[in-house]
Amino acid sequence: MRIGWLPPWVVAPPGRCAVCGAWPARPLCAGCTARFGTARHRCGRCALVLPEGVRTCGACVREPPPLDACFAAVDYAFPWSGLVHRFKFRGEPGWAATLARHMAAIPGVAEEIAQADLLLPMPLARGRLAERGFNQALLLARRLGGRKVDGTLLLRLRETGAQAALDRAARRRNVEGAFGLEPLRADAVRGKRVLLVDDVMTSGASLHAVARVLRQAGTARVAAVVLARTDAPG
């Protein structure tokens, strides 16, 4: 176990707002929630920000993604990028409740969760899971879907290099074949409605790779919800 890491049941929520320092307050106070958490109009297939009245971005019209729908709560910018960093890399899994609350508030997500048969968190590679001590996507999914969550059905089959420095095409190649389904339970998704859960979406390469695996297994509908979305696909 990493030095300084505390398990989820030990980490208490902070008494001050992590952004403005207001006290006493939730981890993110009402003022900062209103200032930084306002919903933006987004593409229904990839969650990029769009002008009002436009339902689907040009890229998704030209090349429809394997996701039937995609939802994002916020832009991956201040203060969310810092909060995600604390959540994932500084051993603060208690942030799951606050971040999932924003994901649940996205217009259309409550209906998507209600209609879903399964909520599947994006799986972590073994090395990253051992280093971090928890899968942040699984913690978020549990806050969103309760009994509908299955944290063992999706598998990470191999390690992949960092995506940040790669262009969109290279990111797709990097994750091809990196995901699969538990072999003895692959039929569990046939004809089902699945909602994928993750913390951050950049190009969407990983989510799309998993969606293609689910499509091949006969899933009826595949959607995704993330906390934060970068401004543009890399």
Image (cartoon, grey):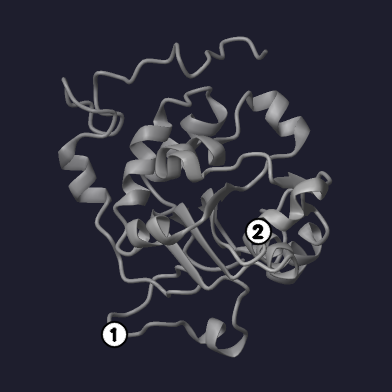
Q: Quadrant of residue 12?
A: top left
The residue to which callout 2 is attached is: 189
Image spot of residue 41 (x, y percent): 32, 71
Give the crowd class for mark 1: few <14, some 14-19, many >=20 residues within 10 Å: few
Image spot of residue 206 (x, y percent): 67, 58
Q: Residue at x 36, y 59 (%)?
A: 109
Image spot of residue 5 (x, y percent): 56, 14
Q: Residue at x 44, y 82 (%)?
A: 56
Give the crowd class for mark 2: few <14, some 14-19, many >=20 residues within 10 Å: many
Up/down of 85 relative to 176, above or below: above
Q: Is residue 73 left or right of residue 65?
A: left
Q: Is residue 165 visible?
A: no
Which residue type carries mark 1? Answer: Gly
Image spot of residue 24 (x, y percent): 16, 20
Secondary element type, mark 1: loop
The residue to which callout 1 is attached is: 53
Up/down of 191 relative to 137, above or below: below
Q: Quadrant of residue 174?
A: bottom right
Which residue type carries mark 2? Answer: Val
